[in-house]
Amino acid sequence: MKCLVGLVLFLHWIQVQAIFEDQAGQNDWYQQHIGGVSFAEFAFRSRERVFLATEANVVSSLDLRDGSIAWRQVLVESDTVKALALLPKPPAVATLSASGPSEEYLRLWQAHDGGLLWERLVEGLHSEQTSATAAAAAAVTAKPALLVLPDVTGDGASELAVFAQRQLQVLSGSSGEVLWKTSALQHWPDVQLAHEGPSADGSHTLKAWALTNGGRSVLEATFAAKDGEPVQEVHETRLAAPRTNLRRLADGSLSQLSSEDVAPGAWAVSPTVQHEGKEILAYVAPSSTAAAHALVVADARSGAVVNRVDMDLPTSKDVSGNLIAASGIWMAVRVKGQATQYRILVALEDKRFILIEDGKIIWTRQESLATLTSSIFLELPAKRSLATSLAQSVPLTLRERLEAEFLGIKGQLGFATAAEKARLGSLKAIKSQRGRPDRDPTGFRKLMVAISEAGALHGIHTGDGRLLWTLPVALGQQALQPSVALLPWQSSHDPSRAPTVALLVAGRPSELGARLLIVNGHSGVIQDSLTLSVQPQQIVAIPGLVREGLGEQSLHLLVDGVGSTPRLHLLPDTPAARSHLARLTTDLHFWSLDPQTGALSGYAVDKKTLAALQIWSIQAAQAGQAALTVASQDPRDKIYSPVKVLGDKSLKVKYLNPNLLLVASGTPAGVSSDALGQEVQALHILLLDTVTGRPVFRQSHKGARGPVKAVLCENWAIYQYWSITNHRFEMAVVELYDQAHMGITIPDLLLHTSNATRSAFDPIAIEASRQSFYLPSALKAFAVTRSARGATAKFLLFGTTSDQVYMMDKRQADPRRPMGKPTAQDMEERLAPYQELLPLIPQAAITMDKQVARLS
């Protein structure tokens, strides 16, 4: 009988450790974004596509039918795309990008899948030029230009003309080889290029021009496209009136009308397009009618209107009533039968872009989701509240349930095709009900409210990733873009009441105080709007919640003017909030840091008068160094246990200080290690109490520098840095324990004989356990998991340079891992033998084979 029970348990263990093939590598949802559009080119050959380069330095191709991403290539974050062009032979996309003043790259991508065909570093002027010539050329800020030429070499591929690094050069489209180059235009600013030809003898020419003399003159030059021989020497022509721009027509000639003449009051004007022997362009401007936007197609030579549509684009205004302007427009013209179709792509300031055909919106992409900066998770509506107003989940029909069962069997047997696996995934998503608009008993379905860099607030369903609502908060003029902070505001134990979040919009020069918006988390509707008397530079979370009935109100302290006497403002400033503040058993403190000088100051808050007083100040960085990073305790973290149980059943008391701060200082970013020398460089780690400014722990790493990524949680800190000595990224961990309670026992904890709160001003003996490891990747992001009660094991989350996220058990970075063979006590604590390498195994990648671009 015992053998039978053991066999059953063994088989049950095997069953729970296995998954089916169709379950492997499954995400709840995965979305790709590309960012706001900077350049666009339409293509209608074999597939209807539009090729884009974006502000996020992404090159991509979208399907014109539905706006889905066909492919995308994410460039290095500092590699800004300056120009984009489409080659007909071979079908390819050319991009010109700059990683610095003297580092520009020309790349060619396959049009059908985005594969890189070739890459070339655009060379600058030769070093043998005189110093005076070099200085004069360097003083010119030249805008790069890119133009596609026909096949002038006879190799069957188009050529590329590029003006970059103050040189004009033509490259082969098939290999990227430089055919010819000239520095005749090295003093020209903002060069424009055009192709002319073929002439009667079959030759092609390349024409270049630029405005000069404050827009009063235009410089022109013409070169043979094949070998670069000058066809027409550089000459200057005076203009009748000063011009801010010259439009290039499709035939290469200069338009006699400026953009202001052709498109008066336009936000954005498209490049010219040749159609039925005419040069036409499109522009978007504020409409003079009741509609918000006017889309106009006009003759580029005369300015005569060819086609005009007045329409309201979705969400035309932000919350301040400012009209959301267009930042770019591109047009393509097609003839279907007797009708002419105008396809217009409009990019808006809030990072949306919309495809419009004959006045009808075909699709819209919300690309502000590509730059989310902060988020708050809220409970979804209860089944009896706002759930009825949201999109309801549709249950599977009998036929769909049978189809799911059949496809599941095929997948388990390995006979399912890719299309069948995708269909099974969609059916499982519906069956799982993870997309339901109401909350679930386990609490996994949430509503994520997130703010983007573009100033738009979004409500996102965490079950399937769909966008529930969008609120344009702070747009208008880009030059006056304010800072926006997202704060928790109100929650309730009444499931019929929607939680709210607060948006603090600060930094507009035209406004004396910040603006506070209270937003309904379920619908995105603004419930209240207030204008404050301060422009906060820092926000301090006040512990605890103000409870009024079933509602709970979060409190925040706004700090205006960090200095010797900063001004404070309680948010919300109500009698209940003041009463809660007065009843707090703990004092309120906050700190400020100057990253350049390393000056760190601490402030105390008078809870009755809301006055702030600077009580300490230290120099956190040594002379010639800078503060590289700081890490503080997350006030939302819950402490499950104040002690650590050792293998011999004894207890070590954790040093739990909510006011602990980590400051890493060292060689400033941008300063070369070779210039300073390895022996004088060091990374300094300081852990201090922000109430008193007293150092708790110090650590110096010689021959090390930033960048530094750090986390601080409970009684331990982990940080990664660059080791100049070992030429690799290393990771150090330190755990702090309270030596004043070394003999504490479990009965002491149960009877609360040692559960006393200690003042920050009382000295305390600290025991520090520390160790160093080697992580085989630099980190772009570093975080720690958190649970509602703190009862779950802590896991480290690594965002790597490959834009993937790995999860690692904190116990692998335990500083007490034994150096030799583990003892019985070590094995009781499950401490693995020490190895300097912390491996990033593929099975630990929670993003699996996906990438999260621009992870930070």
Image: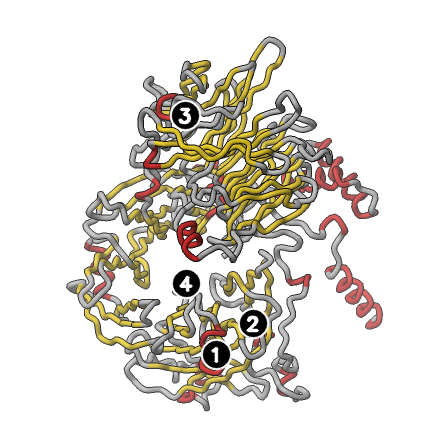
Per the model, the C-alpha gap separating discs 2 and 1 is: 18 Å
Residue 343 vertical placement versus 840 (above, below): above
Callout 3 amino acid: Val
From the image, state whether disc 2 or disc 4 is nearer to you.
2
Q: Which residue is mark 2?
A: 729
Q: Secondary structure at mark 4?
A: loop
Question: Which of disc 1 and disc 2 is earlier in sequence?
Answer: 1
From the image, state whether disc 2 or disc 1 is nearer to you.
1
Question: Which of disc 4 and disc 2 is earlier in sequence?
Answer: 4
Question: Which of disc 3 and disc 4 is earlier in sequence?
Answer: 3
Q: Which residue is mark 4?
A: 636
Q: Can residue 125 be seen here?
A: yes
Q: Which residue is mark 3?
A: 284
Callout 4 amino acid: Arg
Foreground pick, 442 / 620? 620
The quarter of the image holding the N terminus is bottom right
Residue 487 vertical placement versus 299 (above, below): below
* Residues marked 4 and 3 touching at CB (< 8 Å): no
Callout 1 amino acid: Gly
Per the model, the C-alpha gap separating discs 2 and 4 is: 30 Å
Answer few, some or many: residues within 10 Å of disc 2's Cα (few below 14, many 20 plus, some between 14 and 19).
many
Callout 2 amino acid: Phe
Report the residue at 24% width, 52% height from top: 535
Answer few, some or many: residues within 10 Å of disc 3's Cα (few below 14, many 20 plus, some between 14 and 19).
many
Foreground pick, 268 / 302? 302
Question: Which of disc 3 and disc 1 is earlier in sequence?
Answer: 3
Q: Which residue is mark 1?
A: 677
Q: Can residue 438 be seen here?
A: no
* Residues marked 2 and 4 touching at CB (< 8 Å): no
**Left of 97 or right of it: where is 213?**
left
Q: Provide residue 265's location: percent of width, then percent of height.
A: 33, 25
